[in-house]
Image (cartoon, rainbow, N blue to C red):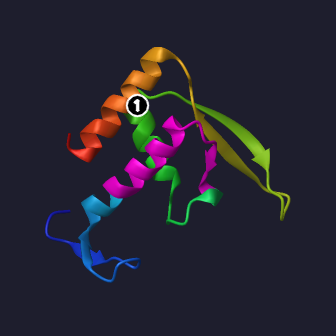
Amino acid sequence: MAGKSRSCKNGGGIMSEALQKSSHLITILSQLLEGKRLSSKDMFISNSNQYFVQIKKHGIELIEVWKPNITNKGKHKERRLHQSIENIRRAEAYLKKLKGK
């Protein structure tokens, strides 16, 4: 969506929607590469599941496990990076591309 921009809540400046989405992807992918387990409830961004889908579309395997919610009877998916050498290489390459390196 070229030309559209929205206010960035954390900095008060204007950030393009595409740049904002890239920032979220960079953060999520970096955390996965650090070995963290993530779920949409851990993210303070709307519709964080879309970012996990985007990562998987780039051939990066995530291990997804359903976990019970602590505060209600619902469930959420907890995700972590599959630790094969090839998968880690794909994740690092995609992260490098997102960072523009």
Look at the numbered disc 1 and give the secondary structure of its residue: helix
Q: In which quadrant of the rendered view does residue 95 lie?
A: top left
**How far across and down, in percent of the image, does residue 8 sit?**
34, 76
Report whether 21 appears left or right of 81.
Answer: left
Q: Is residue 23 magenta?
A: yes
- Give amino acid for label 1: Ala
x 84%, y 63%: residue: 72
Q: Quadrant of the C terminus?
A: top left
Q: 35 or 87, which lies in front?
A: 35
Instruction: Specify the farthest residue to the top.
Output: 85
Report whether 43 appears left or right of 23.
Answer: right
Report whether 74 appears left or right of 88.
Answer: right
Q: Quadrant of the N terminus?
A: bottom left
Tell me where the magenta segment starts and ends, as one range.
22-40
Residue that carries the numbered disc 1 in the rendered image: 91
x 27%, y 80%: residue: 13
Q: Residues within 10 Å of mark 1 (few under 14, many from 20)?
A: many
Q: Main secondary structure of the magenta part?
A: helix
